Image (spheres, rainbow, N blue to C red):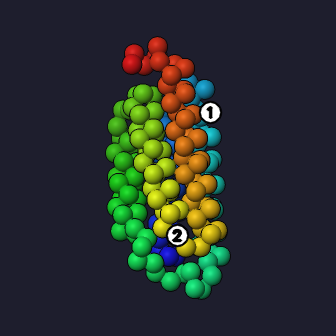
Amino acid sequence: MKAFLRICAEIEATIEQVYQLFARKSEGNPELVKLWRQLAQDEFAHTQQLQLAERMLKPDIAQPNPNLPTDKAQKMLDQVKAFLAKAEDAPLSELDCLKASIRLEKDFMVVHLDNSLQLIDPGLRQMFGALARDDEAHFDLLRAYVRKHDELFDI
């Protein structure tokens, strides 16, 4: 369980870095920079929540749980890190960044919700449910931004 939470925290920290990168790539658009920075702050808070949960685990819950998709979480971490490395060197447009973010938030909303259903501990279930709701709010914010500015993106 500790390894699973550690991986989840690292995923959130990496997504924070993605949003910080997107803020730098969108320097000419203060409204979008503000959005990226807010999302990065939220991901930082998620990282802290997961790290705290790991530290506060009760001994009976801290044991490995075969129902948790630790391998899947590791694969997702590897994918997010690879995306970040590629995005650092790629000339991404604002629309590219928005599309990638919408996809990330949608994917992690499902993952967090699935995790909340696999966990036995009520506190951890609640935390992952809250993470899923935050992902949904991020998804909605990003989609609303695209809709508001659709003339800029020719979509």
The picture places residue 114, in percent across and down from the top left corner, at 46, 59
Q: Does residue 150 sit above or below 117 in this rendering?
A: above
Position of the C terminus by quadrant: top left
The picture places residue 91, in percent across and down from the top left corner, at 36, 32
Give the amino acid type for the residue marked by disc 1 in the picture.
Answer: Lys
Question: Which of the 4 image quadrants contains residue 100?
Answer: top left
Q: Earlier in the sequence, mark 1 or mark 2?
A: 1
Decide if residue 120 is in sight here: yes
**Residue appearing at x 55%, y 81% in the figure:** 62
**Residue appearing at x 47%, y 74% in the figure:** 3
- Please state which of residues 31 and 143 is positioned toward the viewer in this rendering: 143
- Please state which of residues 146 and 116 is positioned toward the viewer in this rendering: 116
| Residue at the limit of the structure toward the bottom, as seen here | 59
Q: Does residue 36 sit above or below 111 in this rendering?
A: above
Dot 2 alpha-carbon crowd within 10 angstroms: few under 14, some 14 to 19, many 20 or more: some
Tell me the distance, in whole angstroms, between the alpha carbons under discs 1 and 2: 34 Å
Nearest-to-viewer mark from 1 and 2: 2
Give the amino acid type for the residue marked by disc 2 in the picture.
Answer: Leu
The mark found on residue 119 in the picture is: 2
Query: Could you say whether the residue bearing mark 1 is in a helix, strand or loop?
Result: helix
**Residue, disc 1:** 34
**Residue appearing at x 58%, y 65% in the figure:** 125
- Please state which of residues 137 and 117 is positioned toward the viewer in this rendering: 117
Query: Could you say whether the residue bearing mark 2 is in a helix, strand or loop?
Result: loop
**Residue appearing at x 40%, y 77% in the figure:** 66
Q: Does residue 27 sit above or below 6 in this rendering?
A: above
The picture places residue 50, in percent across and down from the top left corner, at 59, 64
Question: Which of the 4 image quadrants contains residue 89?
Answer: top left
